Structures are given as C-alpha cells and as structure tokens.
Image (cartoon, rainbow, N blue to C red):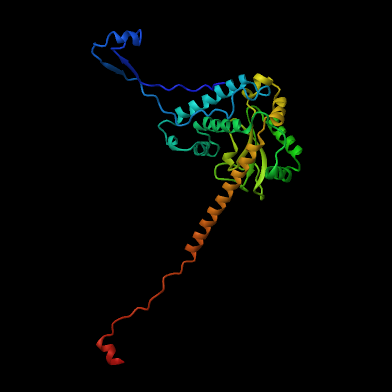
C-alpha cells in the first residue's frame, strides 16, 4: 500500500497561450503572443521535523495490529505531534536544536515548557514504530539476553515485570526497557532508579510524554499505553494488547541494536570524561614559575665598605 505523504505547495504558472482545453487547442494559437504570468502563492513554512513513516507498510502488522489502527495512530496522532511541534518552535531558540535537545531543554527540571509534550511524543512514536515488526516476539539472544537474565533473573521474569509496568501505568503513558549508565541523579530530573550500580537494564514507566532521556537513560524498548494505541483493536483490554505486543510484535533485533549503540555511547562518554580529568590534573600539577634572585646595583659607598 502506498503510504500517505504530505503534499508540498508550489508556485503555479498560467500561460495565456495555453487555452483551457489543452495542448491541441494551443496548436491553433501558435501565432498568439506568448506571455506567462506567475502567480506567487504564500510561502509555505519548511518543516524542521518531518513525519517519519513506520519501517513497514501500514497493513504489515495485521492481524495483531490493524491497518486502521496505524492509519489512526500514526497518520493522525503522530502527524499532529509533528505539526504542532514545528509551529511551536518556529522563530524560537529551539528551532535550531535537535529533537533530543528540545526534549532536554523544554523538560526544564519538571517545570515543563510548551514544546515538551509534542517534542517528546514525536521522539516516542518514532522509537515505538522501530520497536516492533511483522512476525515479532520470541526470545532475544546474545548480550541482550545475557543482561536480561543477569538483571531480572530470567527472561520470563523480565516479561512479567515489563507487562506489569505497562498495565499499571495510570492513565496515558509508556513503559520502557532502558540501559542505565548513570548512578544517581542528573541535573534535569530525579533518577527513578538511584543506585550505586550502573550499566544495567531497568524497567521504568512514565506518564504522558515523559521518556527516559530526561533521566539520562538509553531507551531500548517502548510500549505505548495511551488508549489511542490499542482501542480500535482491543477496546479497553489493555492487558490483552500488552500480551500481544510482547508475544507477537517486539523486534528483539532492534532492541539488541539499540543496546549496542547505548554501550558505545557510554564508552565514548567515559573516554571523554577521562580526557577531561587528565587535562584538569595536568593543569593542577603544572610547575609554578621558578623564582629568580633579584640583583640590585651596588653604590660607591657600598663598594667602599666591602
């Protein structure tokens, strides 16, 4: 199926030597003076952020998730977040920032600024569509499975905890599997899992548009539990939607890829921190300037006394 795309406004050209009935009629008017009048239409604002399509056709997740749900969820709600965000940031300091920087800035230590909800929901939905695939589900492998078993005891225990987090998120929101590389609080938010342990997997849930980026976590998997994500297919049966998501939709390949990305980013951050630390130590231990003995001229009287 062809995915819907936004149409772009273009300037129209009306040529007086082309009559309304087309090219054949125009051939009979070859001797007529040729004049083109350009109609200048109002300039359309170029969007900074665009609506990204899911990485599969809109009917590819059937029968687990219907094409109607994707047309409604992606085509209406996700599109509205993108359009609203572009309007909100136009002409502001946020216009030149990345989506992640807009989220961090507009979260504003919990005193949320207007652009936050739309920016975070654009990011959340882009991430959500990448978290699932046709014929998904099953059991992960490799380092992802090893960390899940280490941090949750077993894969079935992880699934139970993830389902519980999604089911018990009151009202609208999200449940996440994330890679936590920081130990205590960050400057922008209170760490939901403060611990002296780092580089571990955690399950967190968040209300409305909030996502783990504000805690300096690395999201690996997300499930949208806003009602519009599942109502057309499951009505109010959120538990059934969550089970189908885990059993038949999750792309463990995508989750594993994001884990490798997270570990690489953490390693690079650690190297950068080490470079800064060494630089500060070098500045601290720079030898002080050597003191020089002052020499004064000897007067005639002093010379006679010697």
Task: Tell which of 189 and 242 is nearer to you.
Answer: 242
Q: Quadrant of residue 179?
A: top right
Q: Quadrant of residue 253?
A: top right
Q: Quadrant of residue 71?
A: top right
For the N terminus, which image quadrant? top right
100 lies above or below 20:
below
Which residue shows up at 55% across the image and 30% down it?
121
Which residue shows up at 63% across the image and 24% down it?
60
Task: Tell which of 45 and 250 is nearer to you.
Answer: 250
The x, y position of residue 277, in whole percent, is 53, 58
Task: Tell which of 96 and 142 is nearer to you.
Answer: 142
The x, y position of residue 131, in whole percent, is 62, 33
| Horizontal relation, residue 39 to residue 85: left or right | left
For the C terminus, which image quadrant? bottom left
192 lies above or below 71:
below
How many marks do you count on the picture? 0
The x, y position of residue 107, in whole percent, is 53, 36
The x, y position of residue 256, in whole percent, is 64, 40
52 lies above or below 255:
above
244 lies above or below 94:
above
Task: Tell which of 302 and 180 is nearer to you.
Answer: 180
Which residue shows up at 50% across the image and 60% down it?
280
């Amino acid at each position: 199926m062809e995915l819907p795309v936004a149409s772009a406004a273009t300037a129209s050209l009306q040529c007086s030597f082309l009559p309304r009935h087309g090219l054949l009629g125009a051939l009979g008017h070859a001797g007529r003076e040729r004049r083109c009048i350009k109609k200048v239409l109002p300039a359309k604002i170029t969007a900074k952020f665009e609506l990204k399509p899911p990485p599969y056709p809109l009917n590819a997740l059937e029968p687990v998730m219907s094409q109607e749900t994707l047309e409604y969820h992606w085509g209406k709600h996700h599109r509205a977040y993108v359009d609203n965000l572009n309007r909100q940031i136009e002409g502001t300091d946020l216009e030149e920032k990345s989506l992640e920087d807009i989220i961090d800035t507009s979260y504003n230590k919990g005193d949320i600024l207007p652009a936050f909800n739309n920016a975070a929901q654009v990011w959340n939905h882009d991430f959500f569509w990448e978290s699932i695939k046709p014929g998904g589900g099953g059991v992960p492998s490799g380092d992802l499975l090893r960390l899940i078993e280490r941090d949750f005891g077993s894969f079935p225990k992880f699934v139970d905890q993830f389902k519980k987090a999604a089911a018990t998120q009151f009202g609208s929101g999200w449940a996440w599997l994330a890679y936590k590389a920081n130990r205590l609080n960050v400057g922008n938010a209170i760490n939901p899992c403060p611990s002296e342990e780092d580089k571990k997997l955690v399950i967190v849930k968040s209300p409305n548009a909030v996502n783990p980026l504000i805690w300096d976590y690395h999201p690996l998997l997300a499930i949208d539990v806003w009602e519009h994500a599942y109502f057309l297919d499951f009505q109010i049966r959120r538990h059934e939607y969550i089970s189908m998501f885990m059993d038949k939709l999750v792309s463990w390949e995508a989750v594993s890829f994001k884990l490798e990305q997270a570990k690489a980013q953490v390693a690079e951050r650690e190297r950068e921190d080490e470079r800064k630390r060494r630089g500060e130590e070098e500045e601290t231990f720079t030898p002080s300037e050597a003191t020089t003995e002052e020499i004064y001229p000897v007067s005639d009287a002093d010379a006679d006394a010697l």
